[in-house]
């Protein structure tokens, strides 16, 4: 029997509650553990701010989006005496291990804590699907479905008005959401961070398509896509505590450029946080539950410094360091498949 702390950090993601529920359910029923949940990610760990995690507090949450623990983008190592404060919280609360559920930043902190001797088992989360070490993160499929539903709706209005519609989806380093939703939604152009684009080539594609008699087009762009001549096309300047620029707004500039260069009436839609909100798909509830069960088993065996991961159809454990080395960029084959259907 052990006392274990859970936290959710970084952007929220559909399926977080499924992980929390699975860790607690398996941990209590099979191992007889006790749990606390840290509020608002690493911020709660620094402040020893917790809520009890029991059968009662984790029941009825499987289908709920967001996280019952709250989340934040707090960087322990940007705080004064961050490491000591984390160690002091674990000591005060009598905790034997931590299970952080997060993406590159939250698990990056977990990796450094692990090197400093803190017992951690990580669970990978991000709608962006850009974490190495795992084939998929939970939350990704839900975000793709939301984006695909939106593209379907935008198709009919684009067609009715003879317009080009630019749809901006999330994806900071990687174009997974853009490529999957673009392929599923029948996009005519998909722009991703991995392949800097030439705006004139994009316009040429649209001109060719319209010359062939089509009177509308759908362009899907990942928020982190950049033009070949450089420059982040974000509307914002601010950075978070991990040094990431706030993204969003590339579609505004694309709409203007496409309309000016081609003469085709254009409109843009930025899907933004709607992609992260609401009910998780069954796939993400199942993957989150499988990750949670594996994570608590790893912690119970003292198999620390690991991250649970999906490899093929199996849930396995990989070293945290392996998962954090580089972001997992879009598989070129995936992009080439989406490209077959471009205008
Ligand atoms: O990391 C997931 C993500 O949704 C990114 O795609 C996006 O750039 C970022 O989070 C947005 O973060 P925030 O919710 O803090 O604006």
Image: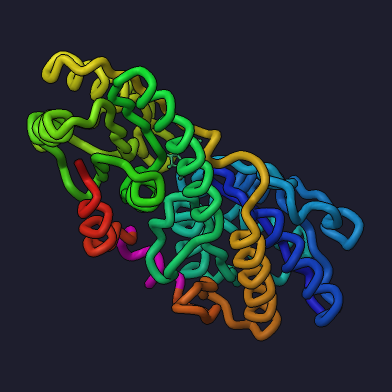
Question: Taking 208 as reference, is 35 above or below it?
Answer: below
- Which range is magenta? 320-327
Quarter of the image holding residue 108? bottom left
Q: Going 39% across and 31% down the picture, which residue do you hit? A: 246
Residue 336 pos. (x, y %)? 21, 58
Residue sitting nearer the eye, 72 or 335: 335
Q: Is residue 234 visible?
A: no
> Relative to 272, is 256 on the left or the right?
left
Name the magenta segment's main secondary structure: helix
Q: Is residue 105 visible?
A: yes
Question: Taking 276 as reference, is 292 above or below it?
Answer: below
Residue sitting nearer the eye, 298 or 223: 223
Which part of the image, by quadrant, shows the N terminus?
bottom right
Query: Quick check: is 322 in the magenta stretch?
Result: yes
Residue 118 pos. (x, y %)? 58, 68
> For the view shown, which residue lies furthest in the front direction?
213
> Relative to 18, is 75 on the left or the right?
left
Q: Going 32% across and 28% down the picture, which residue do you hit? A: 166
Quarter of the image holding residue 88? bottom right
> For the view shown, which residue lies furthest in the right direction?
56
Q: Going 71% across and 54% down the picture, which residue do you hit? A: 17
> Relative to 79, is 96 on the left or the right?
right
Residue 106 pos. (x, y %)? 51, 53
């Amino acid at each position: 029997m052990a006392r274990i702390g859970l936290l959710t950090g970084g952007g929220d993601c559909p399926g977080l509650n499924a992980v929390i529920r699975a860790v607690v359910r398996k941990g209590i029923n099979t191992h007889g553990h006790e749990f606390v949940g840290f509020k608002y990610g690493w911020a709660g760990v620094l402040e020893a701010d917790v809520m009890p995690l029991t059968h009662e507090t984790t029941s009825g949450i499987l289908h709920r989006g967001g996280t019952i623990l709250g989340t934040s983008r707090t960087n322990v190592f940007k705080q004064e005496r961050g490491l000591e404060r984390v160690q002091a919280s674990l000591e005060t609360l009598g905790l034997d291990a931590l299970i952080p559920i997060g993406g590159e930043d939250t698990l990056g902190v977990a990796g450094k804590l692990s090197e400093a001797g803190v017992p951690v088992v990580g669970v990978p989360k991000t709608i962006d699907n850009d974490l190495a070490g795992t084939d998929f993160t939970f939350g990704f499929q839900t975000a793709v479905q939301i984006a695909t539903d939106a593209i379907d709706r935008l198709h009919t209005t684009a067609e009715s008005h003879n317009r080009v519609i630019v749809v901006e989806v999330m994806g900071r380093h990687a174009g997974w959401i853009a490529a999957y939703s673009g392929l599923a939604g029948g996009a005519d152009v998909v722009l991703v961070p991995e392949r800097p684009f030439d705006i004139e080539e994009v316009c040429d594609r649209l001109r060719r398509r319209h010359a062939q008699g089509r009177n509308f087009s759908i362009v899907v762009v990942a928020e982190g896509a950049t033009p070949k001549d450089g420059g982040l096309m974000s509307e914002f300047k601010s950075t978070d505590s991990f040094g990431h620029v706030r993204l969003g707004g590339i579609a505004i500039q694309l709409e203007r450029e496409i309309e000016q260069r081609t003469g085709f009436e254009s409109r843009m839609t930025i899907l933004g946080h709607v992609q992260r909100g609401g009910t998780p798909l069954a796939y993400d509830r199942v993957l989150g539950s499988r990750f949670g069960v594996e994570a608590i088993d790893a912690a119970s065996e003292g198999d620390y410094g690991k991250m649970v991961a999906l490899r093929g159809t199996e849930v396995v454990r990989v070293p945290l360091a392996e998962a954090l080395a580089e972001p997992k960029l879009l598989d070129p084959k995936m992009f080439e498949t989406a490209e077959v259907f471009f205008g």
